[in-house]
Image (spheres, rainbow, N blue to C red):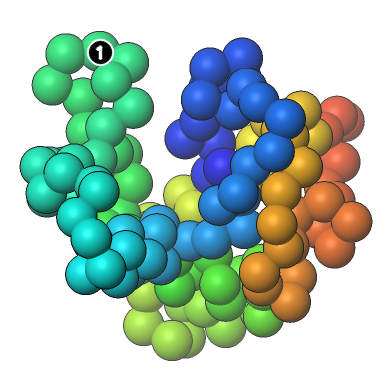
Amino acid sequence: MAVGYCTLYGDMAGGFAVIKDIAKTLVYKLCAWRNLQQEVIPERILTRPPTAELRANQLDQDSLPPYEVLDAIMQMYMEENLSIENILAAGFAPADVQRVTRLIKINEYKRRQAPIGIRVTHRGFGRDWRYPVTSRFFD
């Protein structure tokens, strides 16, 4: 949801988003933990490359950095409120930092239409993070 890899009136539809405030790498860790109790999530779901399935052979990794990098940049930018310069100084590729921070900004309109959900991090989207959606603030 942070970078807009969700579909309005599609996977965002619903009344309550349980994993709304959880980064993708943590989702995978939670799935692995759940399957240790009893396998309920098929292994093929966890091992196949992630895709929004919007077109044939389209994968998230085609336009996003690996989830470990994506989640780290999002945490530094959104949760820790670090500047782009500080994130770059941590050693991330400039193209990845620019892309991720831009996607966070321009997808505010989607997050405003998302269902409510559980807050896990200390600074979640919504009341803790609001970004203007007009007047070209995202440039």
Vertical relation: 17 (above or below) 118? above
What x and y, as percent, mark residue 38? 23, 60
- At horizontal 71% and vertical 48% (from top left) the residue drawn is 117
- At horizontal 13% and vertical 21% (from top left) the residue drawn is 57
* Residue 90 image-quadrant placement: bottom left
- At horizontal 48% and vertical 69% (from top left) the residue drawn is 73
Vertical relation: 112 (above or below) 100? above
Q: Quadrant of the C terminus?
A: top right
Whether residue 126 is visible to the viewer of this picture, yes or no, is yes
What residue would you read off at disc 1?
A: 55
Left or right: where does residue 56 sit relative to residue 60? Answer: left
Vertical relation: 65 (above or below) 11? below
What x and y, as percent, mark residue 10? 53, 17
* In-front residue for pair 83/33: 33
Q: Quadrant of the N terminus?
A: top right
Vertical relation: 9 (above or below) 132? above
* In-front residue for pair 120/94: 120
Tell me the element at label 1. loop
- At horizontal 87% and vertical 30% (from top left) the residue drawn is 135
Label 1 CA crowd tier, 10 Å (few <14, some 14–19, many 20+): few
Amino acid at pointer 1 = Arg
* In-front residue for pair 50/65: 50
* Residue 96 image-quadrant placement: bottom left
Left or right: where does residue 46 sit relative to residue 108? Answer: left
How many numbered marks, from 0 up? 1
Left or right: where does residue 34 sit relative to residue 86? Answer: left
What x and y, as percent, mark residue 114? 71, 33
